[in-house]
Every structure is written in structure tokens, then in C-alpha cells.
Image (cartoon, rainbow, N blue to C red):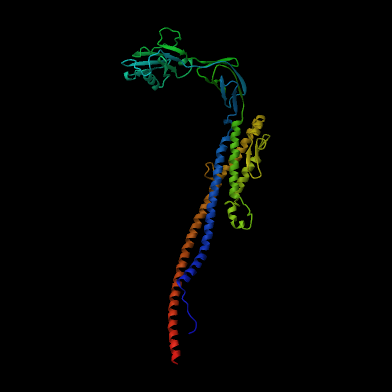
Amino acid sequence: MSGSVTSLGSAQIQSEVATVQARLQQPITLLQDQTAADKAEISAWGVISGTIATLQTSLAGIKDLSTINNRSATSSVTTVATATATNTALPATYDLTGVTLAKTQEIFSGILGSGAASLGTGSGSLTLTLKGGKPEIVQVGSSDMTLNGIAQAINKIAGGVQASVVGTAGGARLVLQGSATGSSQAFSVQGTGLLAQFNYASGASASAPKQPFTLAQPASNAALNINGVPITSTSNTITTAVAGVTLNLTGSGTSTVTVGSSPGAIAAAVGSVASDLSAAVAAINKETQYVAPSSASAATTSSAKTGPLLGNFSASDLAAQLLTSISGAAASGESANSIGFAVSSTGAVTFNSATFATAYAANATGVTALISQIYKGINTLATSAVGSSGTGGTVAAAVKDDNTDITNLNAEIANIALSNDAQISILVQEYSIAEAASTSASITQSYLSIYTSSSTSKG
């Protein structure tokens, strides 16, 4: 019997099976790559969605420019008065003369030893009565019968009078001060028990005889003339004298307050929109970019040089329309460029607040109309892309499609993997049978070889 039968061997079987497994894995690998691409798209849409949501937040700041303060108020002498103004204030100049501050009443006791020294054994009470107001009764027990204890008891009720203890070289004094300014905040003191010595009649002069308390400062209203008109106020903050203007009196004397137009707050809000718009466009451009390989070797890694959304029309078109909402905006004789916007060749959006201020001063109505147009254009695009809450729109739809695709791909991968496992199992079984047959044939051949060799030698 000529020829020979060679045993396959387990190593050879493993090699053959590995080759088949690699071939069967190829469609799975392609599907896994597609799944990874879908996941990269989802991540890219998430980045874009985040920047658009941020843009929506800044857009809310220019939705209604009438809510943004465009007035400023300056004072020539801030040690006499400072001022602020709202949109309702009219540009004007106000001369403040004869300014005197509103003051709180302040009285102090005679020297009564140290603040911690006992005033005697027993208790007492103080009745603090504001001018025309409700009495406030302060109870002081024997354990607290010191100047410090009295002050703490008065302050505990947090009423119309505050107390402190001031130490001097000769001893301590109890000081009482009104909690608010104005002549209506004058107060009187009536003591009982051990505190009977602490009496003070409201309105008593500093020179009044036999007063346990000395009047250091009477309660008084603020007084001033605004463009010659006399004004009084119980407070040093005056909100009703000039419409839209708050005057804060800081000292006595004369000052001039000037109210004028100030678009600074509006410019800041518009600048935020420009910055966030530029960031959104940059994010979209990054996710849709293509960077050509710089060399033949780089061409093998071209996937690392492209954005996950390369070729995605929805993303690219969103960036283009966002830029057009600025570059194409025009209203009432104003353009985006004339009020400070600029769009570079790379899609970067910048804003010049100085240019805006000049345009606003010359044509506030026209600038306001143009900002309103820009707001509406960008807001429409942003809402279409991510919805009003930042979680809907075309972006959410695209993410949903990618997730559906991933689910289908994973199901297909699982089915192919099951089929591959079955094929490999059958193949291994067939190889095992073949190996067993090969081994049997080899044994038979060996026996025949011995037999034929014996027969030949006998002949």
C-alpha cells in the first residue's frame, strides 16, 4: 500500500479553528465599529446641546431690553451723597444743597462703676417708648443687675432701642441708641425697682436738670434742597424725591447728582450672547471638522482627524444659520457690524462694547430693534435644535435615532455571535472525528507495513 496518512494533531486543529473564527468575526467587528461611531455621534451631540443650552441662558438676558437698567447716576461729592437710577429716571442734573443727615437718638447714663459691677440686690424693669409707638418692656432679674446685663436684656428683644456699655477711666456708662433715624424714632425711658434711676423723658434737652441720662444726639430727620425745593426724610436713603432715583446721603454739605444714559448693562448682556454664540459655533465646527492628513502615514489615522459628525447636514447647517443670524441682521438703519458685532472667517463671533455704546447713544431705538431681531433669530434656531428646556428638538431626535441604531446593531451582533458559536462547535466536532479517523488509519498502515515487510523477506 503506497502513500501515508498523517495525523492532523490538536495544534493544527486549533490553528484551523482560529482561522475560521477570525473570518466569522469580521462582520461583527464591522458592526461594532458602526456602534462606536454612533456612540461618538451621541457624545458630539451632547457637547453641542450643552453649548446651545448655555446660549439660551444668555439669550434670556436680552429678551426684553426694557428690563435692563440703562441709566447711571453720579455724584460730584460722594462724601455728601451717592445715587443710583433705574430706567424710569429722566436724564437730568440735580443740585443738592443744605444737606444734613437723619440721626438716631442717643442718650448715656452717668458713671456707675464697671460694666460687670452689681447695681444692687433685687430686680427691675425698663419701659422703652418710641414717640407715638408701642412700649417695649425689658425685665432684668437680680442675677443680671449690672450694666452689661441691662444692655444684653435690651438687645435681646431687638426692638426700637439698642444698648451698649462704654467704659471710661472713671467707670462705665449705659448708652441707649434708637434703632432707626428720624424724629419719629425719639424714645423715652421709665424704670422700676432697682432700675428706677434710669428715667428719661423724650425730647429733654442736653442741659435739662436732674436727668439720669444725658442727651448726646436727638432723633432728627434728614433735610436738604433739591434744585431749591426743600425735602425732609426720616431716612438717609431717599427714594421718593426724584422718580427713578435713589439718593443715599452720606454727610452734610452740597453735591450735584447727574442722571444720564448708560448702556453698559445692555452691552454686557449682548456681549454674553456673542461669547456663547461663538462657543456654540466652535463646538459644532469641532464635531464636524475634517483635517486632511499631512503625510501618507497620517492618512492611516484619518479617522482621528475628523469630527464624529463630519458630513452631518443638520449640525453644519445649524452653525451656518447661527452665524447668519448675526451677519445678516439689520433693522432701523443699524447692522450687526455697526453695533459692535464681528464674525471672522473661522466663525468666531466678537463684540465691541465701545462701538455698541456709540451706536446706542446715537440711535437707541434702532439698536434696541436690532437686538430684538437678533434675539428672535437665534432663539428660534436654539429652540429648534434643543427645545425650550435644552432636552428636545432636532438634537434629541438625532440622539434617539443613534440609540435605536445601537440597539439594532447590538441585537444583530448577538445573533451573529450565536451563529458563529454554532458553526465553530460543528467545525471542532468534525475536526475531532477526522483526527480520530486519521489516528486509526495510521495504526492500520503501520500494521500493514509490518505484514508486507514480513511477507517479502519469506519469499
- Looking at the image, residue 293 sits to the left or right of residue 426; the answer is right
Residue 454 vs residue 43: left or right? left
- Residue 49 drawn at (x, y percent): 55, 45
Q: In which quarter of the image is residue 211?
A: top left
Q: Residue furthest top?
A: 209
Q: In which quarter of the image is residue 153?
A: top left
Q: Position of residue 366 (x, y in %)?
A: 65, 33
Q: Nearer the viewer, residue 123 or 358?
A: 123
Q: Is residue 374 left or right of residue 161?
A: right
Q: In this view, does 215 lie above or below 339?
A: above
- Which residue is at 60% across, 27% downward? 71
Q: Quadrant of residue 133?
A: top left
Query: Looking at the image, which residue sits at the far bottom?
Result: 459
Q: In this view, does 166 lie above or below 456?
A: above
x, y (%) of residue 5? Answer: 47, 79
**How far from the left and from the top, in percent, is residue 216?**
46, 13
